[in-house]
């Protein structure tokens, strides 16, 4: 990843025709479950539509093994996905105009086990600062919603 890519923003598809610019470098307020120690990530678009991204950890030193996750803009596959975000659950002053939501993809393991997305615990991003947090939503959102 070049320095220009790291400092530039990326376009994330939103509901309807709305899209948001999100910083390409994200700083999580706490590690994702199962990935202790990883707080800095690069968000890299994998398509031209602002739907599919690679989320790559930025190693902090030579002993830090990088990780890669895939994330999607959930409204591309689930147009009715409109979770209510509890502003108190986020460690920044959140408002809908500056908040993007991405869902972590589980790729599946074969033809009978296709990809799913985690709609219960999305990655919420402050588009102004690049701070991000994975939050568990109230409500009946699926942990593994089928894609496709």
Image (tube, helix red, strand yellow):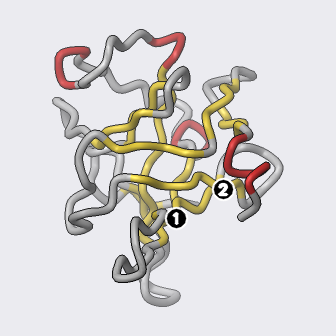
User: Which quarter of the rendered picture does the N terminus lie within?
Assistant: bottom right
How many marks overall? 2
Q: Position of residue 91 (x, y in %)?
A: 24, 24
Q: Residue at x 56, y 36 (%)?
A: 75
Q: Is residue 18 left or right of residue 100?
A: right
In the rendered structure, find residue 44 and report the number of the disc placed on it: 2
Q: Tell me the number on the disc at residue 56.
A: 1
Q: Quadrant of the C terminus?
A: bottom right
Image coordinates for residue 147, horizontal then vertical, percent: 52, 60
In the image as oriented, which residue stretches furthest toward the front? 61
Real-space Cα separation, disc 1 to disc 2, in angstroms: 8 Å
Residue 55, position as x, y percentages in the image? 52, 59
Q: Point out the tag, 1 or 2, that comes first from the N-terminus.
A: 2
Looking at the image, residue 66 sits to the left or right of residue 63; the answer is right
Q: What label does residue 147 carry, if any? A: none
Up/down of 57 relative to 12, above or below: below
For the point 74% across and 40% down, the residue is: 8
Residue 9 image-quadrant placement:
top right
Residue appearing at x 70%, y 21% in the figure: 18
* Percent position of residue 43, x then y: 59, 52
Residue 131, image quadrant: top left
Residue in the foreground of this view, choosing between 44 and 108: 44
Please indicate whether residue 6 sits to the left or right of residue 99 in the image: right
Q: Secondary structure at mark 2?
A: strand
Outermost residue, right direction?
48
Crowd band around label 2 with a 10 angstrom C-alpha radius: few (<14), some (14–19), many (20+)? many
Label 1 element class = strand
Report if the CB atoms under discs 1 and 2 are less than 8 Å apart: yes
Q: Nearer the viewer, residue 139 or 29?
A: 29
């Amino acid at each position: 990843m070049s320095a220009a890519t790291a400092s530039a923003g990326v376009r994330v598809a939103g509901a309807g025709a709305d899209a948001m610019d999100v910083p390409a470098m994200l700083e999580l307020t706490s590690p994702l479950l199962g990935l202790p120690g990883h707080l800095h990530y690069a968000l890299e678009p994998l398509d031209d539509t602002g739907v599919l991204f690679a989320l790559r950890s930025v190693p902090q030193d030579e002993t830090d093994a990088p990780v890669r996750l895939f994330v999607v803009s959930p409204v591309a596959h689930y147009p009715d996905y409109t979770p209510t975000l509890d502003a108190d659950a986020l460690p920044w002053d959140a408002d809908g105009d500056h908040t993007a939501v991405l869902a972590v993809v589980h790729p599946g393991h074969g033809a009978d086990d296709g990809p799913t997305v985690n709609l219960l615990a999305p990655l919420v991003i402050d588009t102004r600062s690049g701070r991000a947090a994975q939050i568990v939503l109230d409500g009946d959102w699926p942990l593994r919603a089928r894609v496709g």
